[in-house]
Amino acid sequence: MNDVPYKIYLDEKELPKAWYNLRADMVKKPAPLLNPKTLKPVTAEDLRAVFCDELVKQELDETTPFMPIPDAVADFYKMFRPSPLIRAKFLEQALGTPAAIYYKFEGNNTSGSHKLNSAVAQAYYAKAQGLKGVTTETGAGQWGTALSMACAFFGLDCRVYMVKCSYEQKPFRREVMRVYGGKVTASPSMETQVGRQINALHPGTNGSLGCAISEAVEAATCNIGYRYVLGSVLNLVCLHQSVIGLETEAALKKYGVKPDVIIGCAGGGSNLAGLIAPFMGAKLRGELDCRFVAVEPASCPSLTRGRYAYDYCDTGKVCPLQKMYTLGHDYIPSPSHAGGLRYHGMSSLISELYDQGQLEARSVAQTDVFAAAQQFARTEGLLPAPESAHAIRAAIDEALECKKTGEKKNIVFGLTGTGYFDMFAYQRFNDGEMVDYVPTDADLATSFAKLPDVV
Ligand SMILES: *Cc1c(COP(=O)(O)O)cnc(C)c1O
């Protein structure tokens, strides 16, 4: 395969024209969302109070395989897509592996991650519905940045509840959002009822993603002309992220490369779901033999150590319940440096595939992750986001395995973003001060005990 270039770009006319809905090819579908008050499957009506109409349709549609990408979204995509699929030849050489390693790089835009793929779609549908603005939460800041960019483009107001510890630790992330017009509030705030409640219960709290979601939902439902948008976990987000996998599929086909293993980091599961979507669809239809690997932090191991159960998606229990691999909605992961992977649950789509045995999962310790990030930066040049480096760790381990067995596998992984806003984490690693947090079984048992009693 010497004729495969280092970077495979697609022509504009080869870009995907429709998103792919993997659920259409699943015989057993992900479990439905439940209304938090009635505990019955949610209706479109329930969801429309919180989410945009068109997004509700996409969320609930599990039979239509392809959904057209609106022209305005496709045009916006052209500013940063196709993203390159890169052959990691220098990393292969450094490892001395017979395997070929490819990575799909999604950090090629100012938000620095794949999240812009869904942000622009969600902002488009909000604008098309005639809304004034949207609300959301952000943890590490990537999603809030992506959404601020998309809202600036479509002329929408954007209110972001940013987890307080990130708000304080990452002041420059906040400023990027403000450049794009995003209004950023540290969460928990005193602006919402749920924020005031959380502050009263836990004075001085640094916040969590679960709290920020509750605040953003309240802000959307209490303001006319606003809806809430979410950057991961939901089926609709996985749908938009399929653009990553569709481009990867087209690029590999162009050079006759058949993937043997596809690897992605998993926080809420959206980039992984998007990257694997067309390949997993082909596997489910019996057309492709390929392994899929989800990589999560050892500090927040929802797939590898969680329970497959209905749980709340947020601390304030205002969002629908979802059946997913979860550590419990009360679980507060230790302060790992991969902010985008610190969510207690996992998308129901990825959870169901994992439960069916179609997908493998492994967890990795953060010092091993940063060692992989450093090796990757020094060989391939790009500075990876700590989240993305989880996938790098697993890809390197697969390639080293091939070195032992002599197998010439094609390994593909998702490099979801860049690490420019994570220099505090890199500093800890460089100074040898980074430690690994792994919850004990007793820690997990405490939060499992608070899972809602719903079957
Ligand atoms: C948010 C984020 C992730 C994790 O989110 P998923 O929904 O699991 O894809 C991974 N990498 C980066 C760079 C992120 O910003």
Image (tube, grey):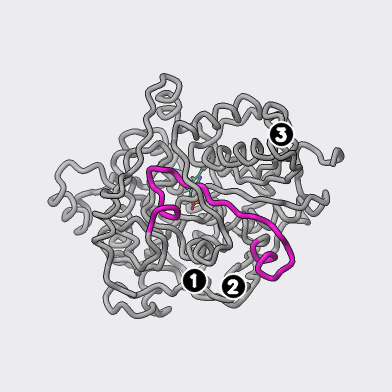
* Residue drawn at the location 70% of the way across and 63% of the way down: 17
Along the line of sight, the residue nearer the viewer: 212 or 4? 4
Residue 30 circle label: 1
Question: Would residue 397 be visible to someone looking at this image?
Answer: yes
> Start and end of the magenta stretch?
280-306
Could you give the CA–CA distance between mark 2 and mark 3, rounded to whole angstroms?
A: 35 Å
* Residue drawn at the location 36% of the way across and 73% of the way down: 49
Amino acid type of the residue tagged 2 in the rendering: Met
- Mark closest to the chain's N terminus, 2 or 3: 2
* Residue drawn at the location 59% of the way across and 76% of the way down: 27
Is residue 396 on the magenta stretch? no
Q: Rate crowding at label 2 as few (under 14), some (14 to 19) or many (20 or more) other CA atoms within 10 Å.
A: some
Q: Nearer the viewer, mark 3 or mark 1?
A: 3
Residue 26 circle label: 2
Amino acid type of the residue tagged 3 in the rendering: Thr
Residue located farthest toward the front when viewing the structure as drawn: 405
Q: Are marks 1 and 2 in contact (CB under 8 Å)?
A: yes
Confirm if mark 1 falls within 8 A of ligand 1: no
* Residue drawn at the location 65% of the way across and 70% of the way down: 66
Left or right, 324 with reference to 101: left
Could you give the CA–CA distance between mark 1 and mark 2, rounded to whole angstroms?
A: 9 Å
